[in-house]
Amino acid sequence: MYMDLELPCRPDGIDAFLAQPTPGAVESLRRLHGDMIIIGAGGKMGPTLCLMASEALRKAGSSSRVKAVSRFSNAKVRQALEAAGVETIVCDLTDRKAVASLPEAPNVIFLAGMKFGTADATEMTWVMNTVVPSYVGERYRGSRIVVFSTGCVYSFSSVFDGGSTENDPTQPMGDYANSCVGRERVFSYYSKQYGTPVTLFRLNYSIDFRYGVLLDVAMKVASNEPVDVTTGSVNVIWQGDACARALQCLEIADAPAVPINITGPETISIRSLALRFGELFGTTPLITGKEHEHLWLSNASKSFGLFGYPTVSLDQMVKWCAAWVQSGGEIFEKPTQFEVRSGVF
């Protein structure tokens, strides 16, 4: 039997809830000047980031605008952004001339990339993760840029070592992770060549009600499906906190490019997550596999020193995720594939 769990917002108000800016994000944008362009704004995190940036600018008393760039294959996403005062621009980022024609903006956040389906489309993976960055790096070499990357650029680290730090080498496996290193290298080239201030935003598992490792585990427990614990442990961070830190990372952008790990402070085992969801759902989870000691884990202590700890705790995320599953809320149908250790997604 399910425990009595409550959501922090109405299901139709989830986007506004996720997009509430932190005080730190508001203060960062108060100190920055000029419009912001968010490239790859139609994906999982893009709409939240656009809405948060717009609201943070409003709270900061700034007249600067947020401009969202994407193919916008989902018309509802575009309509929601425009209704919130975000200017939208339809652009095929693989078209060099189209990217070159994008409007000026002193502040740029780059989210575009490809992960899922890379095993069957390796060529497009490399185009999206290395060629598109070269177009954007060239177009915005006079701006400051936050480049979304991933903790997968590191090799595995021991669960007992606290995760990879920004000083560790980037020696991953698989086309996806290596193409992400390529993305970083391309933007780092423009940073060195033109003095473009760049932050390499190495994000490790952003969590939303509708997507993420917690949801993947919760759905399996709720439906009595086996939970594979082979991956062992993960790091997670609330999507609202991740977006707020992306805005704050505009201020720390520098040349040469600055890497920073973004995730939560806990290393949480998949087995523990399954057992916790079992308690919340009143069921005994089915566990399969044996935990590995060496995993993709990130040490985000540098970001904590700069921005403080995330505002949403792991326990709160777990309870919200359980409540969302219990309510039958909408999900994105995009499993994270956290079980994959080969780097092939």
Image (cartoon, rainbow, N blue to C red):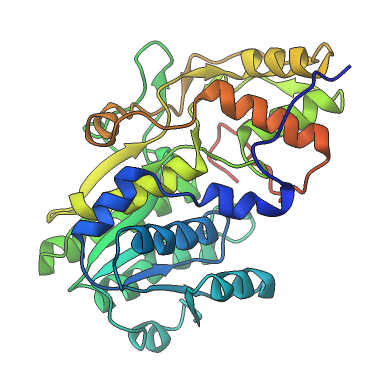
On the rendered structure, is 218 left or right of 256? Answer: right
- Residue shown at 39% from the left, 53% from the top: 148
* Residue depicted at 70% across the width and 34% down the height: 216
Residue 184 percent location from the top left of the image: 30, 54
Relative height, residue 258 to residue 136 (above, below)? above
In-front residue for pair 268/187: 268
Q: Residue 266, image x and y in percent? A: 45, 20
Q: Picture coordinates of residue 40 (x, y %)?
A: 48, 66
- Answer whether residue 274 is visible to the viewer in this image: yes
Question: Image quadrant for the N terminus?
Answer: top right
Q: In this view, does 312 lie above or below 128?
A: above
How many numbered discs, if any? 0
Q: Nearer the viewer, residue 305 or 132?
A: 305
Q: Nearer the viewer, residue 55 or 135?
A: 55
Q: Compared with residue 81, is residue 119 higher up or lower down, i.e. above or below?
A: above
Please say if 55 is above or below 155.
below
- Left or right for 129, reference 30: right
Tell me: 207 left or right of 306. right
Q: Which residue is drawn at 33% across and 56% down?
A: 147
Which residue is painted at 35% across and 67% down in the image?
Answer: 133
Report x, y in % for residue 54: 42, 64
> Can residue 289 be seen in this snapshot?
no
